[in-house]
Amino acid sequence: MRKPVQISGWYFYSLHLILLIFAAGLVYFLTGNRIDFPSLYFPESHIVTVAHRGASGYAPESTLSSYRLGIRMNADYIEIDVQETKDGELVAMHDKTVNRTTNGSGNIKDLTLEEVKSLDAGTWFNRKHPIYAREEYTREKVPTLREIFETFGTDTRYMLEIKDPEDYSDLEEKTWALVEEFGLKDYIAIQSFSKDSLVKIRSWDKNVPLFQLLWYNRPAHISEQQLADISGYANGIGVNFLRINENYVLKVKHAGLLIYPYTVNYQVNMENAAKWGVDGVHTDFPDRFKEVIEELDSLDS
């Protein structure tokens, strides 16, 4: 009987490493010297979970409670909408006004930080979602980006959205300065609907993961030219989930871009997103999405 050939485990390790280096080099060549940094952080089989304004299905959006809960639910990123007050302070707020998510009114850009900090940022949530209401939410305040970084540091990654840059002259600069101050460049990704904002940030750092946000009012379509243009400065796109389909996802991925649709909250949509091959999702319920992925993985195995 022929003696079995003994192959060392190191052989397979070395071969895998060589193939990985070759693949990275191929991507580097084919994508105009651009490497998909988020895909290096997470293996391809891992679908990234972005806690949309924190775990905002369970706690007041864009508050420390919501972000803390998103981290506790093992989201890969907490998403933060960055805006600027009248006196130049960076705060977390999705809307241009404070009307919907506080007991105040007015545009963020027209209010000082002191005025914003005087507002109740949690009671509205208790009224709207009594099943998840907590007394402590009535004491929530609008957090500054500095407070968020001070509170969570390197315990999580941050998906920072540059909001309405046309309303501010230096929003990108102030955001980037704060990231550098806290030494968090390896812990962030940045998204925006503004191409100009992303191009500006790309000029400062060639490695930071950038996502071009898109919104469709009808079934989504993206041209090869659009994809080529986005590939020149961004690593991926974020797009409203309800307007896309599997072919759209495949087209984006074929162009070498990541795709992180928003906002995926219902189980059937979570399942479809995973089956279509998205690279990540924004969701108000990061724990539910994790459960869906675990269930799909168990069925595959």
Image (tube, rainbow, N blue to C red):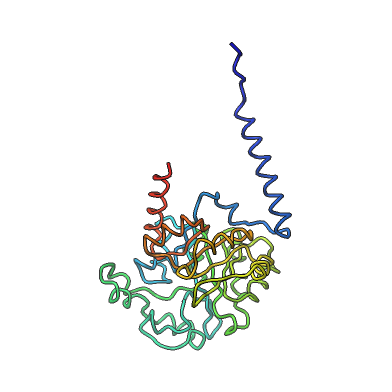
Total numbered badges shown on the rendered structure: 0
Residue 57: quadrant of the picture: bottom left
Answer left or right for 127 relative to 266: left
Q: Position of residue 126 (x, y in %)?
A: 29, 73
Answer left or right for 172 relative to 131: right
Residue found 74% across the figure and 54% down from its top: 29
Q: Position of residue 75 (x, y in %)?
A: 45, 58
Q: Position of residue 220 (x, y in %)?
A: 53, 71
Residue 10: quadrant of the picture: top right
Q: Position of residue 4 (x, y in %)?
A: 59, 17
Residue found 71% across the figure and 69% down from its top: 203
Foreground of the two, 4 or 155 = 4
Residue found 56% across the figure and 59% down from its top: 250
Foreground of the two, 119 or 290 = 290
Residue 72 visible, this orientation: no
Q: Quadrant of the N terminus?
A: top right
Residue found 49% across the figure and 78% down from its top: 217
Answer left or right for 271 relative to 161: left
Residue 70 visible, this orientation: yes
Q: Name, please, the residue furthest toward the top.
A: 1
Q: Name, please, the residue furthest toward the left.
A: 131
Q: Quadrant of the C terminus?
A: top left
Foreground of the two, 152 or 256 = 256
